[in-house]
Amino acid sequence: MELTTNVEINEQKSVAKVSLIGALNTDTAPAFEARLQEVVAQGLQVTILDMKELDYISSAGLRVIFKAAKQVKAAGHRLAAANRRPHIDKVFEILKALPDMAVFANDQEMDEYLESMQEQVKNS
Amino acid sequence: MLGSSLTTRLATMLTLCIALTLTAINTVDYQVSKRRILKDVEASAETTVARAARDIEVRLASLEESTELLAEVLSQTPYTESQLVALLRDVVDDREDLFGAALALEPRWTENPQRGFAAYFYYHQGEVTYTDLTGSYDYVLRNWFREPASNGQSGWSEPYFDEGGGNVYMATYSVPVFRTIDGKREFFGVVTADLTLDELQYYLDRIELGESGFGFLLSRSGKIMATQNRDNLLRPLLQVLPPGQDVTHWAEMLTDVSDGQNASSPVPCEDATDRCIVKLAPLSSTGWPLGVYYSEREMLAPLREYLAKTVLSEVVTLALLMIVVIWVSRRITKPLRALAIATVDISTGNFHTPLPAAESKDELGRLVHAFSLMQDNLQRYITQLEKETASRNRLEGELAAAAEIQMSMLPAGGNASVEEPAFSLWASLRPAKSVGGDLYAFHLEGSQRLFIAVGDVSDKGVPAAIFMARAMTLLQQYAHAGLDAELILARLNDDLVEGNENCMFLTLFAGWLDLETLQLHFASGGHTPPSLRRGDTCESIEQLDGPALGLAENLEFPVNALQLEPGDLLAIFTDGVDEAFNAEREQFGIEAMNELLLQHRPLPELGQASFDAVDHHAGSTPQSDDITVMLLELPASRRCEETRQIRLGSNEQTVNRLLKWMSALLSQWQLDAGLQSEMILVAEEVTSNIIKYGELPAETEIELTVALSENSLSMTFSDPGIAFDPLTEARRSALGADIDHAEIGGLGVHLLQAMTDQQEYRRSDDQNHLRLVKQL
């Protein structure tokens, strides 16, 4: 039960896409937390957690996401989740976790969201 | 206003009674008086007639006497004719009661036989006047002369109108005078005396017999000599009778009288409606009938007048009486009417309505006093009732709260339904009053032993509930300590004896079931034997019974051992079930319960059916005792249960090891991928929690037992860490908050409760035991 984390950063768009592959549990959470903190520290407008290949998440993992979400919000930025699989979704639902976090069911929704974000940035 | 009031009735009845009485008295009085008066009148009429007759006869006798005397003198003494005239004048002059007198001599013996001698003196305009009756009058032919001359007897003439002499109505008494002439008794002449009928009328006028009553005098031939109506003078009575009179009857009466008898008869009055009376009696000297005629009605006039006055005075008296009665009774009933009005007011709830004042100590006074007492008592009673109602409401509220607290002391709040791979258990308690004295308990020790108990405190209500609470606390304490059943009963007994002044007691069934061997070790303290259903039979089990708990110290309870078999159903209940009464005072009975238990249905349905059956039996009879039913069913076949265990040290690799082991195991059991993921998540949450907070001593391990049965998956975590019940003590974050308010951490317990169906924590053997079951 390992967790692989891939980070793609588009500085031009000020978007970070963090892909989680494997299990985010008590064991893997500390490492992931460190990795995520690095990304958040860059102060990008949007940080998207892509959970397409996340098999499993425990409360320890959620704790890391909560923490990041608070930090991003404090900086006036955004944290979003994409591609949550049903059993991951269920965990979020049970805990009623982050009701105000943007959630995209698939890549297309995510792209559209990014587009609109860009528009907003340009306009502002 | 009066209508059908007491006043009206009183006045009417009283007046009516008195009026009737008076009428009766008056009628009787009138009849009696009438009879008496008529009798008196008759007597008085007879007396009147007699008196008038006597007076008249005295008058006649006097006249007759003097005439006779004159005749005697004349017969003895020779007078010259002029002497005779003078003598006659003296006589008439002397006797004022004499209208006139005549002296006529047989012409033979007169000085002038051709002419004769007849002198007549009479009163004319107050003067004594002389008339010579000789000459054309031819006195010798006159009756008054002829009759005495021929028969030689004195007597009265019929009445006549004297045209020649006095020109008055009169009757004449003639006396013949005989003189001895030459030794020979010769008729010498006649002396007469005239009596005017007016003189007689004088006596009749004195008769007073009512207004129209009068007297009358008849001559011997029936001519009227004196009467009211002078026109009828000299006429025969029978010819002048008014129309309507029976002439024959009158004639008969006259005949009787002329025979010397008295006659008396009622005849019709002139107006024919009344009765008149005629009385006739002959004058003894002349035989002239003297009669009276009077109207009875007139004679009764005074009586009627008296009666009329009496009736009038009675009517006036009655009217006065009625007024007085009405006044008095209205005065008496005035407080009653006021009381009626006040009572209506009171009936609307106005208890302060003043009652009429009644100072008197009579019935009314007492009534008003009684009403006033009633008013006060009602008011007090209502006030008390209001107070009592309020206090009862408060008490009921408190009782309801107490009932809630009591039910919460029971496992699953009084309605338990547990599904385990090794057994199913259903238990329910329904108190008869809001709080009760029944109890039940169960406790799974590890996954090996199941403790079950059902008890019943004597009596019900609040005292029973408090006793039950005490017993319940102690029972759970001893059960968790894992004491054997008989020991639990013995200890509990000793505990309950202490301070049990009220001598309350507890019957209790308690036992441990070994889920591996299905051996039930139990003890009973006077409790109804449980029923055992095996296959198609259901019977009460045989047990060695001990005494009820709480009455005496240091008791021992016999141990019972019962080997159960797969598929068995054990029903433990309190006497509220078998001793439930219906309206006919018949008990529900253990047999009925056993029969009902034969139905193979899911336990909750079967349990509910047993309550329904008891209710149906009782009908409208209120539940008299607490009812508790506990059903324990063993699976028909031992479901092939697979159990795996892992011991985890507390190090960095713990969670990773756990996850890998779990993942492999669940995949091997071919469970649904989602379910696998959830169970792994739960296992991780629990384990990481224990590691993080359990302060596990070094070299100790967490033991996880995972068991799979046909329809459930259970995970039991045992650790020697500090006593910690994550189900109640773990920090829980509030869910649903937005990112600004969301807590970081405190999420795990939410997850394990959401993802498993049953969670159970207990602390025993210095270990935490957390058992989680997921139904499949």
Image (tube, coloured by chain):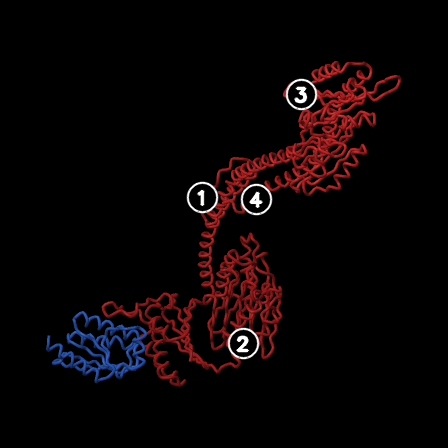
Q: Chain of mark 1?
A: B
Q: Residues within 10 Å of mark 2 (few under 14, many from 20)?
A: few
Q: Which residue is mark 1?
A: B352
Q: Earlier in the sequence, mark 3 or mark 2?
A: 3
Question: In the image, residue B268 lies at what x, y percent?
Answer: 69, 41
Tag 3: residue type? Answer: Tyr
Q: Which mark is residue B123?
A: 3
* Marks 4/2 same chain: yes
Tag 2: residue type? Answer: Thr
- How far is mark 3 from mark 2, CA to CA? 178 Å
* Marks 2/1 same chain: yes
Question: In the image, residue A22 lies at what x, y percent?
Answer: 28, 82
Chain with blue colouring: A
Q: Which residue is mark 2?
A: B517
Q: Is the Cβ of the residue at disc 3 closer than 8 Å to that at disc 2? A: no
Of marks 3 and 1, the one in the foreground: 3
* Marks 3/4 same chain: yes
Q: Earlier in the sequence, mark 4 or mark 2?
A: 4
- How far is mark 3 from mark 4, CA to CA? 81 Å
Q: Is the Cβ of the residue at disc 2 closer than 8 Å to that at disc 1? A: no
Out of A115 and B269, give the one closest to the viewer: B269
For residue B8, what is the image quadrant?
A: top right
Residue at the extreme right? B183
Of marks 2 and 1, the one in the foreground: 1
For residue A61, what is the image quadrant?
A: bottom left
Q: Is the Cβ of the residue at disc 3 closer than 8 Å to that at disc 1? A: no
Q: Is the Cβ of the residue at disc 3 closer than 8 Å to that at disc 4? A: no
Q: Which residue is mark 4?
A: B9
Q: Earlier in the sequence, mark 2 or mark 1?
A: 1
